Image (cartoon, grey):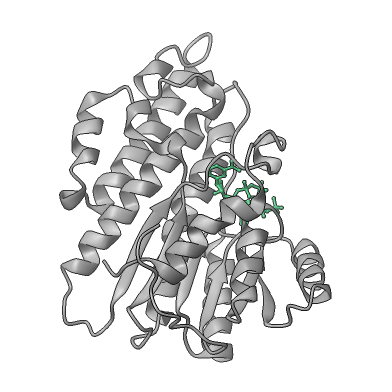
Amino acid sequence: MGKEAERWWSKGTVAVVTGANKGLGFGIVRQLAKEGITVVLTARDATRGNVALESLKSQGLHNVNFHPLDVASQESILALAEWLHKTYGGIDILINNAGIANPDNDVTLETVKPALDTNYFGVKNVTKALIPLLRDDTPGGARVIVVASIMGQLKHLVNKDYVKTLSDREHITEDFVDSFVNHYLKDVVDGSEKEGGCPNWTDWVNSPFGRALESYSVSKVAVIAYVSALHNTLVAQPGSGKKINVFSCCPGFVATDINNNMGTKTVEEGADTPVWLALHSPEE
Ligand code: NDP
């Protein structure tokens, strides 16, 4: 995995992980906490979040704190940002992990929107709200990591114009990624109004899973492109005094609830990649 960075982190380093009450998010929190970092475990359900927190404490990990976060709610995002500011002053690492898949072959705005709202707009809105809190003096720069997926590979997109534009990583903009997502949502609405559902679905994703994971794929294509767009925006604003490294990654096929525990990797193995990016990644 390349040359390991020096151990730059300490108890004063603060990491925030979304969707961390179970699965990969929980594994990521545990690995970061074992490194001695202060970790904020967030979850949309306070009971589930606190149960996860207690479980980590019972394993001797007392450097973990909990705060609620529903990434699909702007109110919840702003409440977290305010609490982080009051409690820590700033943060060093943000890991956007929360995600959902729509296993439904019935593609309507109602069934696909949660995946887009969580996996794309949720990541964007959380990142936008927390960027001002990323510290100027994190050694090597602050880190923003997005847990994406190979389901977001451009090879799954049928529209070759989008493949071409989204492949041009250096010129991707947030507005373009928004327009891509909004185009998809409009097609879902238009298509589901047609008799027999949305007949032109292969215009979007060509996947062995059929339409069931279409919105998941589109959301992951979009969020990977967003990471490039964010990188481009940050690079275009040199001299802001803040260095931020942004990465997306796939954890591999990990046995969690999102795939009914069919994955072949353990949570510990899957969490390893985002944790490595957070701690050891080379500076961009
Ligand atoms: P899980 O279903 O085990 O965990 C998903 C987590 O996201 C849960 O904590 C869930 O909370 C949370 N979540 C969902 N919606 C929201 C929301 N609106 N706000 C806050 N939290 C939310 O799945 P994984 O651990 O596998 O998934 C983690 C990430 O990894 C996802 O982004 C997924 O796409 C990605 N991934 C997973 C792969 C795998 O093989 N497992 C492969 C590639 C990528 P709750 O318990 O309340 O539902």
Report the residue at 35% width, 66% height from top.
3
Q: Residue placed at 47% from the left, 63% from the top?
A: 276
Above-or-below relation of 128 to 39: above
Nearer to the camera, 246 or 268: 268
Residue at image coords 43%, 63%: 277
Q: Going by the image, does 153 lie left or right of 257? A: left
Can residue 208 be seen by looking at this rendering? yes
| Res. 98 in view | no
Percent position of residue 147, x then y? 49, 52
- Toward the front, the furthest residue is 3
- What is the count of numbered marks? 0
The N terminus, quarter of image? bottom left
Closest to the observer, 30 or 186: 30
To which quarter of the image does residue 2 belong? bottom left
Which residue of the protein is positioned furthest toward the top in this rendering? Answer: 196
Quadrant of the snapshot with the C terminus: bottom left
Q: Can you give x and y, in whole percent of width and height, for residue 242 in the image?
A: 28, 81
For residue 54, side relative to residue 78 (left or right): right
Where residue 229 sits, quadrant-wise, is bottom left
**Place of residue 142 in the rendered image (x, y in percent of width and height, measured from the top left):** 38, 76
> Is residue 265 rendered to the left or right of residue 183?
right
- Residue sitting at x 48%, y 28%: 214
Residue 236 image position (x, y, % from top left)? 15, 67
